[in-house]
Amino acid sequence: MTIADNKKVNPIEKAKAQKHPLLLKQELDNFAQMGWEAMDEFERDHGLKWLGFFYRPVTPGKFMLRMRIPNGILTSSQLRVLAEIVQRYTQAAGFQQEGNADITTRQNFQLRGIQIEDIAEIINRMRQVGLTSVQSGMDNVRNITGSPVAGIDADELIDTTEIVRQLQDVITNNGDGNFDLSNLPRKFNIAVAGCRDNSVHAEINDIAFIPAYKDGKLGFNVIVGGFFSAKRCAAAIPLDAWVEPGEVVPLSLAILMVFRDHGQRANRQKTRLMYLIEEWGLEKFRTQVETQLGYPLQKAAPKDEIIWEKRDHIGVYAQKQPGLNYVGLHVPIGRLYASDMFEVSRLAEVYGNGEIRLTVEQNLIIPNVPDSRLEALLNEPLVQERFPIAPKPLQRALVSCTGAEFCNFAIIETKNRALAMIKELEAELEMPRPVRVHWTGCPNSCGQPQVADIGLMGTKARKNGQMVEAVDLYMGGKVGKDAHLGSCVMEKIPCDDLKPILRELLIEHFAARPRQVAMVSA
């Protein structure tokens, strides 16, 4: 079935057919004059997402900006421009006293509190330093993830930085917008792993490339179809294909075109790639991809090279380059303000080579720090007071989506609650190791609770005759070697009743011990 044959389509598809949303870039000045309230509803609420701007009804009149930062790598100059945008163009919203930016679980930045009048100027400012936000939402390929230490990891197998960059450039037409690849049936995630520890969470991507040796050559095994959604979560399955590094981009494009031309466009709850694979069967899907590609795929290598437990890269680590180090900073719940961003930019320039990297755990890395400058960097106030290299175990592995503070899909507030509750638990418990606790505000699972040791998904529950914010509790998620998704073990726990339950789980399953309370003599 091609796009033309797909007669039964959902309202989003009908609206896209009327006007391609990338064309809205030509109308930004007009939108600025008319104001957000007078805009066409589809164009405001959905269409502008093709340009990277997300209207948020919970903060009326304000938009969220989602970037594209391939492999999570950006320069100090680029981060400084983002800081200037936060400082000049964003406004306080939610519980915040000023505009802010969040690091996402796809090695990306989201900036909040933007007004329609400023979007055109923001796009121009970003373009001047090589940044783009195009095609970062709706029916597009989202930010492409890779190892956060690509090219500098002393133990990496292959540097995937250039592969990821080439993928983004082709998919977005070098940041100008690609009309051929921006009308997918639904969102699409791609990850390219180059290390042994699955730092990209390969199993939750529509396409993931995993390092593997075949006949003595290093390339990638390919898995397909992984996704999270409100109705279903599925781990990616093997395509039974192995490709050389130079084939990653062509194969990705072939899969995207098959999905674009044949994916379902009716019920948006059933339009992800996995549904097409299941409708056809894996063999037919693979054959269609080969036809689009123009040559047969090699069979998968017998085993891949994901053999380590996952690393979080927080701390100080020697690089493959002699005398250089990368320093992983913990950013609590991934949230930064303009002052933080300016300071990170300064630190990257003074102590490194001006590069900054983001991780899927919502933290950041300053690479290329010489041995001679390491001590001075670690004594900087930002590292000592805000973004430490040795956070407490529970805070270290805490991940949270945006939550109801800014997101209209979220059922509960997450970020602020998550950090406050973890701090309370750390005051009561001694933890022998980090425990990955992930919060997500709704079943869309942006916070990825299914990959966590303990995952918390927002819902509602009845307590004392009133509907209150609550969570469903997931356990058993595994990342790194032998990754698999966790499952729901408890439902509808009121958030006010959650802390003692987490306390007991941490003691029973993760060897936490109650802290000894010192006795004060009379």
Image (cartoon, rainbow, N blue to C red):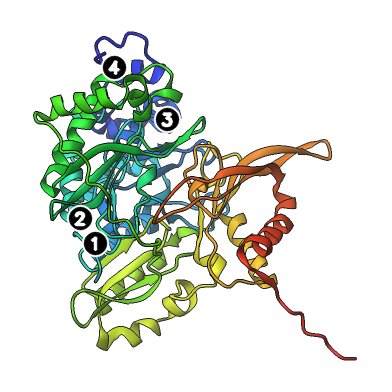
Q: Quadrant of residue 366?
A: bottom left
Q: Earlier in the sequence, mark 4 or mark 2?
A: 4
The percent position of residue 57, horizontal first and vertical second, equals 51, 35
Q: Earlier in the sequence, mark 4 or mark 1?
A: 4
Q: What is the secondary structure assignment of the residue under circle 1?
A: loop
| Labels 2 and 3 touching (C-beta < 8 A) | no
Residue 325 in sight: yes
Q: What is the secondary structure assignment of the residue under circle 2?
A: loop
| Labels 4 and 2 touching (C-beta < 8 A) | no
Toward the viewer: 283 or 408? 283
Instruction: Name the amino acid, label 2.
Output: Thr
Residue at (42, 26) in percent of width and height: 38
Task: Please tell me whether residue 310 is drawn above or below residue 183 in the rendered image.
Answer: below
Instruction: Name the amino acid, label 4.
Output: Ala
Q: Nearer the viewer, mark 4 or mark 1?
A: 1
Instruction: Name the amino acid, label 1.
Output: Ala
Q: Nearer the viewer, mark 4 or mark 2?
A: 2
State the residue position of label 2: 160
Mark count: 4
| Labels 4 and 1 touching (C-beta < 8 A) | no
Q: Earlier in the sequence, mark 2 or mark 1?
A: 1
Residue at (60, 71) in percent of width and height: 431
The percent position of residue 355, horizontal first and vertical second, equals 24, 67
The span from disc 4 to disc 3 (Cα, nearest Å) is: 16 Å
State the residue position of label 4: 17
State the residue position of label 1: 150
| Labels 2 and 1 touching (C-beta < 8 A) | yes
State the residue position of label 3: 45
